[in-house]
Image (spheres, grey):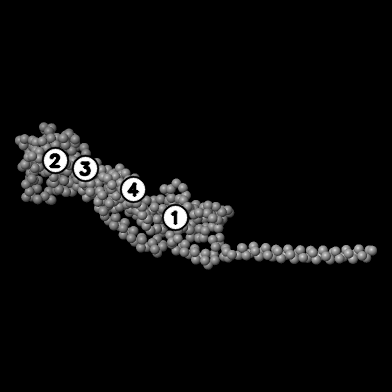
Amino acid sequence: MAVYRSKTRSFGSVSFCSPIFVPILFLLLVQWCCVAVTTAYEENDKFCIRTQPMLLADIEKHVNPLDGDPNCKVLATTLTVKEKESFLATMCKDHGTSYKDTYYFFKLRNGELSGRGTHKEICDGMRNPLLAWVPYNMVLENFVQELNPKEQLSYIGKATDVDREKTELCHFSHTDLVTNITADLFACIVMIFEDNFYGQDANINVLVEINPIMYELRNITYLPWVNVSTSYKTLLDRTVLHNPNRESKQIYGSIKYGFVEKVHLNVSTIYSHNLDRLPLLFEHAGAVLELNDVGVGGVEVSTKAYFGRFMDARTSVNVEVIGQWAEHHQQFNADVFEYFGYGIKRYRNEIHHGEVTFTRIESAEPVYETPDSKHLAASTLHNMGGNKFERMEMADGENGTQMADWDDEELSGSSHDGHPYPGFYPWFVVGTIVVAVVLLTVVIGMVRAWSKIEEKKLYKLAASSA
């Protein structure tokens, strides 16, 4: 038996250390708790639906229809195609809407009595209900206490006579049901000529209509129109990038994070298509989500973000990965299926221009908590859904107080390459050149003075020789 429940979960690896994240976290928890409280709808495991009728041989052997599932208190067996054709021929031709007599059947939703209908509703051809048979004793045990004993009605049933190997439509009195008439006095009168009757020992079954408990929206086709609006950013995770190598290079890392994608269906666009106001099952992301009465549900999402940057040799950098929440407003067409429980569903109709909003983390970006490398390179991030690395631009005011701290550091004299005096090297070069020029001038002067001394010595030597 398929049971659909919405699941909610806290953000998997999200860090909650930032003070600004506390009020946002509180609002999210309140929002998702409301979703969890209103999506507690479950199928009644005491109510079972069977699509295969019992064979006459099984009835003759007095086989208990609940032997296969002893937990079932109410077992409904749907009508076969031949049984429904016989029902329409008998009730709509011989006891049609023009006759003053009205025959009733019970309506069950999730194994509970939800009302009663008449055979004229079916014969009008406006509805195609899911009809089934419920053993008389089960109706007697589970639904009689909800009936008014003073009513004068006739209910539709069928009686199976094992000896004659015959099954016929019949009707029995409301009084016989609510007062629990014994087998000797109970009578289910044959519908066609009303010239025969059956007792309780003739395997009496009561006609019921099984109402859907949910609608499934399947085969969803989204229309080209889409409107996207972004909201706050949230911290997804923290990590560290290390470059243990001797050379500068591009270093990549990744984090895994989880969140609950919110689905908000505009129910006014759904119930306006002649549908009862029932819980909705919505086909999304390869799963069937249960939405509450206001059309809100959620699905857990796990994804991974890749990021990287150019780093100096043997350095490390702290990274915070920030996610951007976004709302996608879309229109869609879909097929509506009625879900009756016990895995049974049936096509109802199709709807057009339904409206749904998905609230999810649209993108993620890294925020580096240490200065950039002296090498000019773009910081990059790669999402699982993307096909290439994208250039990430750090916008003013988008990255919180950490960017403001970096600006203060730059103003106070610290540079991105880690040197405490960013203006030292230019002055050092200029000073070196000046010193070199001075030294060169001194050397040239000394050489010229020494040359003059040597010339005088040679002149005196020549004079003395003469």
Q: Is residue 140 left or right of residue 415?
A: left
Residue type at mark 4: give it.
Trp
Tell me the residue that label 2 is attached to.
Answer: 124
Q: Which mark is residue 49?
A: 3
Q: Give the alpha-carbon distance from disc 4 to disc 3, as whole Å.
A: 42 Å
Tell me the residue that label 4 is attached to.
Answer: 225
Which badge, 4 or 3, is on the more N-terminal residue? 3
> Which element carries disc 1, helix, strand or loop?
strand
Q: Give the alpha-carbon distance from disc 2 to disc 1, as whole Å.
A: 62 Å
Residue 341 is situated, as x and y percent measured from the top left of the image, at 23, 45
Q: Is residue 144 left or right of residue 407?
A: left
> Given this view, does label 1 or label 3 mark the residue nearer the observer?
1
Q: Are marks 1 and 3 in contact (CB under 8 Å)?
A: no
Q: Is residue 456 something that shows in the picture?
A: yes
Residue 257 is situated, as x and y percent measured from the top left of the image, at 41, 53
Q: Are marks 3 and 2 in contact (CB under 8 Å)?
A: no
Residue found at the far top of this picture: 164
> Given this view, does label 4 or label 3 mark the residue nearer the observer?
4
Q: Give the alpha-carbon distance from disc 2 to disc 4, as whole Å.
A: 41 Å
Tell me the residue that label 1 is attached to.
Answer: 365
Determine crowd level at label 4: few under 14, some 14-19, many 20+ residues with C-alpha closer than 10 A.
few
Q: Is residue 150 above or below residue 90?
A: below
Residue type at mark 2: give it.
Asp
> Which element carries disc 2, helix, strand or loop?
loop
* Nearest the eye: 411 or 362: 411
Q: Which image quarter is the C terminus in?
A: bottom right
Residue type at mark 3: give it.
Ile
Residue found at the far bottom of this picture: 412
Q: Give the quarter of the image for residue 259.
A: bottom left
